[in-house]
């Protein structure tokens, strides 16, 4: 008798990665996930309201938003990431990638949204504390430390994409 496949680790850990990116740079997580899904479409999303996350135009839009966020994050007028409207955006970004990821991996979109939102909020506060702490300890401008954070987000997102196994043997 064939044993059922446990999809939980394949859902959980990548979701934590995507949601952490959402907490650091809100648009980076959907940019990376839509990139993955346009190259590796998932049949579990085909009839889902989340199917738009597999559209090339959506992926391009999120990539443009992510690039804009990287630039505007360094501006003196940029709001604090823990300010309620900004924090809400990060929570929603984490929820979107969480719902999409869990749904694509045979899980509950609602459960993925809840977990993704929670991880994104936690990552928002953790990355903010880290950024401010490094800035203070090293005597560096916060914006310069933000460039390092950008590099970490880009490297982390790229590593997360490389770690995903393509369905039916397709390469990314």
Image (spheres, rainbow, N blue to C red):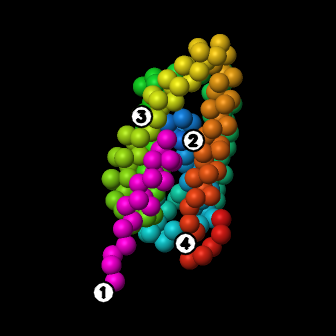
Q: CA distance from mark 3 to mark 2?
A: 16 Å
Farthest-out residue, left? 1
Q: How far apart in space, not on screen, are marks 4 and 2 (Cα)?
A: 25 Å
Tell me, yes or no, whether the two marked residues, 4 and 2, touch with CB atoms within 8 Å. Answer: no
Residue 3: quadrant of the picture: bottom left
Q: Position of residue 32 (x, y in %)?
A: 60, 51
Measure the alpha-carbon separation of dots 2 and 1.
Answer: 44 Å
Give the labeled residue for mark 3: 122
Instruction: Give the residues drawn in magenta, as a range.
Output: 1-20
CA neighbours of label 1 inside 10 A, class few (<14), some (14 to 19), many (20+): few
Whether residue 72 is visible = no
Q: Which residue is mark 2?
A: 27
Secondary element type, mark 1: loop
Q: Is residue 42 left or right of residue 76?
A: left
Q: How far across and how far down the image is residue 71, in percent?
A: 69, 30
The quadrant in which the N terminus is found is bottom left
* Residue in the image at 52% along x and 21% along y: 80
Residue at coordinates 43% horizontally, 64% vertically from top-left?
105
Q: Is residue 17 visible?
A: yes
Q: Which residue is mark 4?
A: 167
Q: Earlier in the sequence, mark 2 or mark 1?
A: 1
The residue that label 1 is drawn on is 1
**Residue 150, image x, y percentages:** 65, 35
Q: CA distance from mark 4 to mark 1?
A: 24 Å
Give 66 or 48, whichever is nearer the viewer: 66
Q: Are marks 3 and 2 in contact (CB under 8 Å)?
A: no
């Amino acid at each position: 008798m064939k044993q059922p496949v446990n999809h939980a680790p394949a859902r959980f850990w990548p979701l934590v990665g995507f949601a952490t990116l959402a907490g650091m740079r809100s648009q980076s997580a959907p940019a990376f996930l839509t990139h993955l899904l346009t190259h590796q479409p998932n049949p579990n999303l085909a009839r889902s309201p989340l199917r738009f996350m597999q559209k090339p135009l959506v992926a391009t839009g999120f990539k443009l938003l992510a690039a804009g966020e990287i630039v505007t994050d360094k501006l003196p007028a940029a709001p604090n990431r823990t300010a309620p409207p900004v924090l809400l955006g990060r929570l929603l970004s984490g929820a979107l990638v969480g719902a999409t990821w869990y749904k694509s991996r045979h899980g509950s979109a609602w459960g993925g949204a809840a977990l993704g939102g929670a991880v994104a909020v936690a990552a928002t506060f953790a990355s903010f504390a880290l950024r401010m702490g490094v800035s203070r300890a090293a005597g560096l401008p916060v914006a310069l430390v933000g460039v390092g954070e950008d590099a970490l987000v880009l490297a982390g997102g790229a590593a997360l994409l490389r770690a995903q196994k393509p369905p039916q043997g397709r390469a990314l």
